[in-house]
Amino acid sequence: DGGITQSPKYLFRKEGQNVTLSCEQNLNHDAMYWYRQDPGQGLRLIYYSQIVNDFQKGDIAEGYSVSREKKESFPLTVTSAQKNPTAFYLCASSHSFGGHSYTGELFFGEGSRLTVL
Amino acid sequence: DAKTTQPPSMDCAEGRAANLPCNHSTISGNEYVYWYRQIHSQGPQYIIHGLKNNETNEMASLIITEDRKSSTLILPHATLRDTAVYYCIVRVGRYGGGGNEKLTFGTGTRLTIIP
């Protein structure tokens, strides 16, 4: 089935360690997004990418890094520079607007919950 | 993308219609209104979207005011499973043109269905 897959679902990390969250989609979407969600809060945009080998900072990019080497994949690295990384991380994808297949709908993964010990 | 404003929380009795408002006073002519909902600890789920006409699907109805500055999502017969956080966002539609799209969400409305 087509969809967007995040892994791992739960992750524990010691302070000072980098960790990479995986996001893979087989929907043939050009655009991919990473959001962070803290308890009782909305979604905040970390990074987004409209096309392979290009990405842009969102509202809270400090302490995070991404890559977009393949259309299907948009991994997020939470670095040791991120002061408060414990959160729920959501990846999403959609067609890029203007294209024939564009509907504007965002498809989300089930999320990755990162806890720093 | 234009920003949206939603009430932080609402209650609705089970079986009644839930009406969730959203203000998007700076919406552009080529921007659509989208609604998503997020059940606890899951990824948000698409509900419905529209440009200027009212829309209905199997999940909900969307009413957009004539000036497009606000909209209302209607869940006609709310059930306990509709308890979730509902997000209203606006984004460029099909013929909106090019450029990078910084797609932001607000804090949404936490809807609680009361038995």
Image (tube, rainbow, N blue to C red):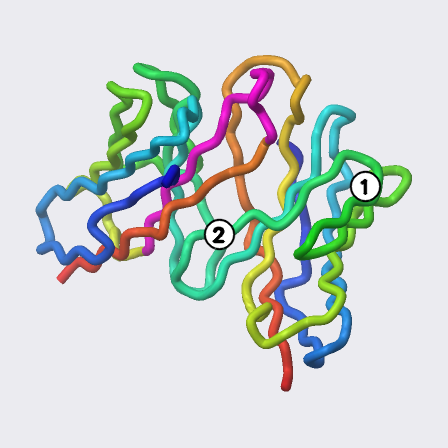
Residue A115 colored in magenta in the image: no
The mark lying in front, picked from 2 and 1, is 2
- Mark on residue B69? 1
- Residue B70 vs residue A60: left or right? right
- Residue A80 vs residue B50: left or right? left
The secondary structure type at the circle numbered 2 is loop
Depth check: give the residue in front, B88 or A29.
A29
Residue type at tag 2: Pro
**Which quadrant of the figure contains the C terminus of chain A?**
bottom left
Q: Quadrant of residue A115?
A: bottom left
The secondary structure type at the circle numbered 1 is loop
Q: Residue A89 location in percent, x, y?
A: 33, 49
**Which quadrant of the figure contains the N terminus of chain A?**
top left
Q: Residue B103 location in percent, x, y?
A: 53, 34
Residue type at tag 1: Lys
- Mark on residue A49? none
CA distance for labels 2 and 1 = 24 Å
Contact, CB < 8 Å: mark 2 with mark 1? no
Q: Residues within 10 Å of mark 1 (few under 14, many from 20)?
A: some
Q: Quadrant of residue A65?
A: top left
Give the residue drawn at x 63%, y 32%: B91
- Work out whether mark 2 precedes mark 1 in sequence or the reverse, and give the earlier one: 2
The answer as to whether the residues below labels 2 and 1 share one chain is yes
Q: Residue A60 location in percent, x, y?
A: 38, 39
| Subunit that carries the residue with mark 1 | B
Residue sitting farthest toward the right: B66
| Subunit that carries the residue with mark 2 | B
The stretch of residues the image draws in magenta is: A88-103
Give the residue drawn at x 78%, y 45%: B55
Q: Which residue is mark 2?
A: B44
